[in-house]
Image (cartoon, helix red, strand yellow):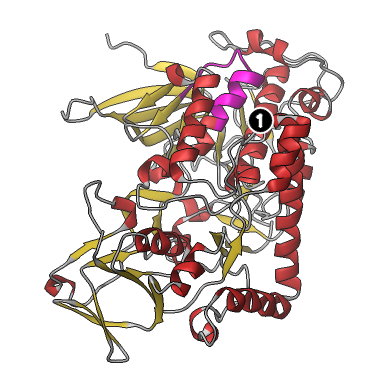
């Protein structure tokens, strides 16, 4: 007789920035919860372990990219990938998450059973010795997908005509060879986004020359590499209090810049152009190379610490060419204008491929889930998919700002379910909710290429995905868990949703405000966990869980 699969209360997919945060929130706020973190790769850190290209760094300031619960104490405003990876490893060690993380565990399928009120998760496990992966199973009461939306095994590489004739080396930043030497070589970096503007000054330190070849320009803004105010506040107030203040300031600054950009795009365009012109040599063709056709924040601004990209251009170590590729030649790249760029090394910083939920196949009561048919509830759950949450951050601010709010809400939701003896929850979709639109309202090419494979959003709450930290604080941190949309039920009851194609009976959800919640089913850990909620009142969703699980 085969052994029963291991069961946990919460299964977290991904041991990057989001998954590590989820583990910490569960460990500190719901310590009786059993959870595991499954990571497909053989190392933690997600993006920050995968990307190893020269100069890799954050494109958000660390006051907001760092967790709310763990102050960033290093000096640099835009930190290196190595520094961020060290920060994540510290977080894992500080909260004892090593024993909860399973490396080399790739989740390939997750099937929900309403009768059992649990997920059965199929996992491919790499043995670590180079042998073939084996299949395993786990079960969980709640599934949290913290794998982001990038595809880790391949980056986007457009058609490069004539690439086979090129005698040099072509690499993608996502798969940078550890032994690649670029000192003294002529380098062409294809692209104009955050990766390109990071690579160019880093490569220019040792290369003979670096050319950034772009079809169209991006907005590039120089910011100080160090924050003297933050350093002074840390000395005066200590790390934790200073981090909270600097974080609030940065959130406010980011929101004001974004709001001004959307309301007065022409004004912001002029300001960004003037700032770029001030950083570049006299007579430089700013309008051709640093004046995009789109408005600010239609795509992310590219931040460069202390203007390192502009400095490389001023010093003649780097240049920018705005043109299209006609074909590769044996010795370089011929452009549509007829000019040719000599190159020994070509770096295709042409973007990433997106992959929803790590490519996991989701099934609910035997029916496959087609993601474009679902709506995002509060930007963290899927319509008609029970006891499932995911993490997608902001496109106009730091990813981690959303991570803290989502993980805090997840803890409040689980505490609410424990307090009332619920085993499952779902956000059923009302087909009369109105028109839908793509999940992300963002014009970056890597997003537009893949959005048709993602869930969608509605026109209004709770089905709209706000790109506003202020709105999310009101809903996810301060708003009630039981908002009238979520439905809860207990094992053995018919679910209140309607997500299964063959489900004919729909029962009303159990009353959240019932003074006498039914006892948890056998085998559940809910009984031990109700102590995590300090006070159960007539409406615990608005008081007890909110008081205990307020986001830091």
Give the x, y percent position of residue 517.
Answer: 75, 15
Q: Residue at x 51, y 50 (%)?
A: 58
In the rendered image, the residue lying farthest to the front is 315
Which quadrant is the C terminus positioned in?
top right
> Residue 499, located in which quarter of the rendered image?
top right
Q: Does residue 386 appear in this view?
A: no
Q: Does residue 303 appear in this view?
A: yes
Of 540 and 318, nearer the camera is 318
The vertical placement of 526 against 481, above or below, is above
> Mark 1 Cα within 10 Å, few/some/many (few <14, many 20+)?
some
The vertical placement of 236 against 250, above or below, is above
Of 452 and 133, nearer the camera is 133
Give the x, y percent position of residue 178.
Answer: 25, 46
Question: Circle 1 sits in a helix, a strand or a loop, which is it?
Answer: loop
In the rendered view, does 297 fall on the left or right side of 201?
right
Residue 29 part of the magenta segment: yes
**Span of residues in magenta:** 21-36
In the rendered view, does 409 fall on the left or right side of 352?
right
Q: Which residue is mark 1?
A: 69
Q: Residue at x 68, y 17 (%)?
A: 421
Give the x, y percent position of residue 256.
Answer: 76, 61
Give the x, y percent position of residue 226.
Answer: 62, 49
């Amino acid at each position: 007789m085969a052994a029963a699969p291991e069961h946990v209360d919460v299964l977290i997919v991904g041991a990057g920035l989001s998954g590590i945060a989820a583990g910490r929130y569960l460990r500190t706020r719901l310590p009786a919860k059993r959870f595991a973190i499954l990571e497909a790769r053989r190392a933690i850190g997600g993006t920050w372990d995968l990307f190893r290209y020269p100069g890799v760094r954050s494109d958000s300031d660390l006051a907001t990219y760092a967790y709310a619960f763990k102050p960033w104490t290093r000096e640099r405003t835009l930190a290196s990938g190595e520094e961020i990876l060290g920060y994540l490893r510290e977080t894992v060690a500080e909260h004892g998450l090593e024993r909860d993380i399973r490396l080399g565990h790739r989740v390939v399928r997750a099937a929900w059973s309403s009768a059992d009120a649990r997920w059965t998760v199929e996992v491919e496990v790499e043995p670590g010795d180079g042998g073939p992966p084996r299949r395993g199973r786990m079960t969980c009461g709640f599934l949290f997908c913290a794998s982001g939306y990038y595809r880790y095994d391949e980056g986007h590489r457009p058609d490069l005509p004539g690439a086979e004739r090129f005698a040099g080396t072509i690499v993608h930043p996502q798969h940078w060879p550890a032994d690649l030497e670029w000192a003294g070589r002529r380098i062409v970096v294809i692209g104009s986004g955050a990766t390109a503007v990071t690579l160019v000054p880093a490569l220019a330190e040792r290369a003979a020359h670096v050319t950034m070849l772009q079809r169209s320009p991006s907005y590039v803004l120089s910011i100080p590499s160090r924050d003297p105010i933050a350093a002074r506040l840390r000395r005066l107030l200590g790390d934790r209090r200073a981090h909270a203040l600097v974080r609030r300031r940065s959130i406010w600054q980011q929101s004001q810049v974004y709001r001004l950009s959307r309301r007065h795009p022409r004004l912001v365009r002029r300001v960004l152009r003037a700032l770029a012109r001030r950083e570049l040599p006299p007579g430089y063709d700013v309008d051709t190379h640093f004046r995009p056709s789109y408005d600010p924040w239609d795509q992310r601004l590219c931040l460069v610490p202390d203007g390192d990209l502009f400095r490389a251009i001023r010093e003649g170590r780097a240049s920018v060419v705005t043109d299209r590729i006609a074909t590769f030649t044996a010795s370089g790249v011929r452009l549509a204008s007829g000019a040719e760029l000599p190159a020994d090394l070509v770096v295709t910083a042409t973007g990433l491929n997106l992959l929803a939920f790590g490519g996991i196949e989701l099934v609910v009561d035997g029916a496959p889930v087609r993601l474009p048919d679902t709506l995002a509830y509060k930007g963290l759950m899927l319509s008609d998919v029970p006891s499932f949450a995911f993490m997608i951050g902001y496109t106009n601010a730091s990813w981690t700002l959303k991570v803290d709010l989502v993980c805090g809400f997840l803890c409040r939701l689980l505490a609410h379910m424990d307090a009332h003896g619920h085993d499952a929850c779902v956000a059923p979709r009302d087909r009369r909710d109105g028109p839908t639109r793509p999940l992300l309202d963002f014009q970056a090419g890597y997003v537009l290429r893949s959005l048709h494979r993602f869930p969608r959003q509605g026109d209004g709450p709770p089905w709209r995905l706000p790109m506003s930290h202020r709105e999310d604080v009101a809903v996810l941190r301060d708003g009630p868990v039981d908002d009238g949309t979520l439905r809860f039920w207990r094992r053995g009851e018919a679910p209140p949703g309607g997500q299964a194609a063959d489900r004919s009976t729909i029962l009303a959800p159990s009353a959240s405000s019932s003074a006498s919640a039914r006892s948890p089913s056998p085998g559940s850990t809910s009984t031990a966990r109700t102590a995590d909620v300090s006070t159960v009142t007539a409406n615990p969703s608005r008081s007890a869980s909110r008081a205990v699980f307020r986001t830091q």
